[in-house]
Image: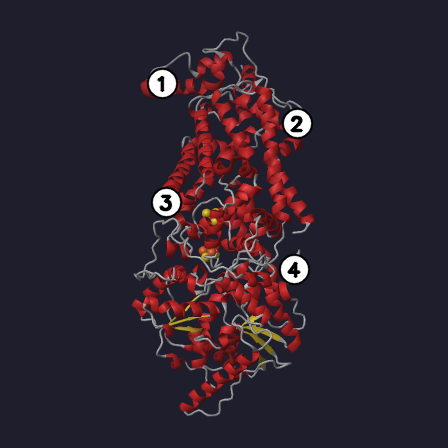
Amino acid sequence: MNKFMAKIVVLIFALVLLSPFVVNAVRGVMGSSATAIDLVLPESGECVKDKEYMRANHMDILKEARVKTVRDGVRIKDYSLKNCQTCHTNRDEFCDRCHNYVGVKPECFECHHFPTSKERKERCEGN
Amino acid sequence: MAKEKIEVPKLTGKIEIPRIKPGAALVCEHHKAKEQMLTELGYPSALVENWQEKAIAKMRELLNKYKSLKLYLDVCVRCGACTDKCQFFLGTADPKNTPVGRQELLRKIYRRYFTPAGKLLGGLAGAEDFTEEMLKEWYAYFHQCSQCRRCSLACPYGIDTAEISMAAREIMHSIGLGTKYTDEIILKVFNVGNNLGMQPKAIKSSLDFCVDEMKEAYEEKGITNIDVKIPMDVEGADILLVVPSADFFASPHIESLLGYAKVFHQAGISWTLSSYASEAGNFGMFTGSYDGMKKVASRIGQAVRDLKVKRLVIGECGHAYRIAYNFWNTLTGPFDTLDPKYPVPQHICEFTYDMIKRGAIRLDKSANDEFVVTYHDSCNVARATRMGDMPGGQFEIPRAIIKACCNKFVDMPQETIRENTFCCGGGAGLLTDEMLEIRIKGAMPRMQALKQVVDSHGVNFYVLICAICKAQFTKIFPMYGFPMDMVGGVHQLVSRAIIL
Amino acid sequence: MLSTCYTFSAYFAIVIFVLGILCKVWKYAITPNPLKISLTPAPTNAAGVILRVILDASLFNSLFKSNKFIWLGGCALHLALLIVVASHIRFFVSPVPELIMLLQTFLQSIGIFIGAIFLAPIGYLFIRRVWVDRIRFVSIFADYFILILLFCIGLSGITMKYFIRPDLVAVKTFIMGLISFSPEPMPTNPIFITHFTLILILLAYFPFSKLIHSVGIFFSPTRNQIDNSREKRHVNPWDR
Ligand code: SF4
Ligand code: SF4
């Protein structure tokens, strides 16, 4: 392989290896912090457990509540999705922001309805 | 080793993977090349004092010259897929005769002197100093590789241990370590022109004798008008035929030479041998030396020009055909003066096959009725060359010729033929008496496969297209209890069947 | 302190990884092939050769023909690697593309299975390496080291997914910070720190290890040369 071809080959490999950087740069977020997520948080600032715990493990709590409810018929009021909604009123302003960001799809909404801010507004107007 | 009685493996018809016996084959060593041979070849006459340094320097040079070497030393993952593929491991059970085990001998040194991990971590990174014991292992094991490439076929990255063995042999040569057998032969080619060291006169008289004998044989059958000739040094002939020099007088090689002669005669094409290029083989490859190989090959280009031929055909020889097919064009080409309508060079089997297809020669199958024939794919032909236009023609064309020459043909088990074929056990410089033990053991897998078809189909004739295979098998067959004259060339069958 | 340290090490590892591989690629690309050494039967045209290399690189064609057991282990391991890498893409792009989301949903639904298909082949290959005498004989420490390293990476990953969870938003923020050159704080979950450290080790070790086979496979002359020696003259670059 001559030097010219070799350079092209190296370039191709470089592009592949640096793809995370390249993609990011192409999407125009280079150098800027594209990462701040602003959640709409309730004023009380209090949850059923502390914030750090909730951030990492809320799915366990919800799952536990689900299992208890469905299998044993015991409702844990604190951990019910309904209870969440009392503070976190809009799904798109709370759940979806992080979930979309890290690419995790919650299973909750396959059965449960958790209105988005738009739906809520429409409903209010309708009433 | 030759003194003790060598135990010949039992034939069961099955090829089993042995439990390892480390060091089992270390004692089998080639005789070392004599001082004066090495000097004549331009190498140091004995192991040089600073051999480590010299060897590393040579290795550096080769790493920059051969992509294969550079790459293959890096990429092996020691997956083990090649470990049960080498006939010399299957035969000797020495794990350093597994392809990867063999490579590791060089790779350890490579890691130690050329990779950051090896320099830093030494043994932890699989690196080792180039010690005298290591050199001894190099000498033994790298000369126990027949460069057959069966391992390369098995390897997920195509790692060709042959390339690594060649490099190791060249490095050893550069510090004054070579094998007597191969060096002697290369010198004979340099000085006389062929591996046997036969002078043109001797070749001529051997050929004359052989033609006379053939005529007599025909006369006994009442056929008198035979005028098949074996011409030599005929300027302006259409075809230059280059054959391994063993074809000039060794048995059964010479039977095939008669076969070529008859085919040319019936085809009505003028042809000639050359006394200058009287060797198709090229042991330069066995030492890994590019220059040596080139010097040997240069005789071919010279003869083509001198004899003003139009076509170049090569006789039955495995490694020779590999070199002819893949390397001649690079080493001694371009062959501008030759007729581009024909492949350059062309294998004699391609030529004969063409003649059969065109009806230019007629064959009487019944002449070989006493035989049940099987075919041994020679490793170099199978895995390093092609015949005809289609990939795999190197398997089909010889078989097609055989089937045109006889009524009873059976193949040995699939996993031992075609691209999976085993080496005869005598290639790449092993064909010498002191290596008899390795040759016997290396032939074991092939013998097992043969045993199977001998038992099941009554095979009694074993044909092939390689001079080294022929020499190796005629020696080894009796040890395994097969008759020596069971071995023959494809053109030996042609020679018997062709209607003159 | 932790963040600075890790940001620095991460860039360090990435630079070694990328430059190391590119150096190898360069070396492999420019080292000449003096002679034609294609392993026949080989394709007689470029398209055939490309197909041959692709089949070898993707389906491990040659390995399949030569050893089904190793092929199985190798395939499982590489497939698992592929899936694992794919399921990590979501940490490297923002917003997450639809396709990756779909994949993610699928992977979520098969759950713990992913972890198993990652660890199982590693275990299998490890056992095979120790078990088969001739493979054990040729193995060097580095061969075991890689398997152990991958195993630990997998194990820490699984632990994070199912047992000791980090704050994923913090994790992604950290990674996005790295790849957009605007460092963010390092998450403090100990398992994440372990996982991340091991990966940096893997990256920095990659170019110097046998893992370079992933690049080398594309340069192997016995596989990527066209079988046309008679039709086209091959010239040795250092012997013209
Ligand atoms: S098959 Fe290839 S990669 Fe595997 S051990 Fe043998 S040479 Fe190494
Ligand atoms: S080239 Fe042939 S003889 Fe040499 S290691 Fe490979 S399989 Fe064995």
B356 shown above or below C79: below
Q: Secondary structure at mark 4?
A: loop
| Amino acid of disc 1 | Thr
- Residue at image mark 2: A29
What's the residue at 67%, 70% (across, down)? B336
* The N terminus of chain B - image quarter: bottom left
Q: Secondary structure at mark 1?
A: helix
Is the residue indicated by label 3 positioned so its CB lies within 8 Å of ligand 1? no
- Residue at image mark 4: C235
Q: Residues within 10 Å of mark 4 (few under 14, many from 20)?
A: some
Label 4, label 1: how many angstroms apart (C-alpha)? 77 Å
| Amino acid of disc 3 | Val
Task: Tell me, yes or no, whether dots 4 and 3 are on the same chain.
Answer: yes
Task: Tell me, yes or no, whether dots 2 and 4 are on the same chain.
Answer: no
- Are circles 2 and 3 on residues that touch, CB within 8 Å? no
Pinpoint the chain carrying mark 2: A
| Amino acid of disc 4 | Val
Query: Where is residue A92, by image quadrant?
Result: top right
- Residue at image mark 3: C132
Q: Residues within 10 Å of mark 2 (few under 14, many from 20)?
A: some
Image coordinates of residue B414 in percent, x first then y, are 39, 61
How many numbered tags mark residues here? 4
- Residue at image mark 1: A69
The residue nearer to you, when weighing B163 against A1, is B163
- Are circles 1 and 2 on residues that touch, CB within 8 Å? no
Q: Secondary structure at mark 3?
A: loop
Task: Tell me, yes or no, whether dots 1 and 3 are on the same chain.
Answer: no
Q: Secondary structure at mark 2?
A: loop
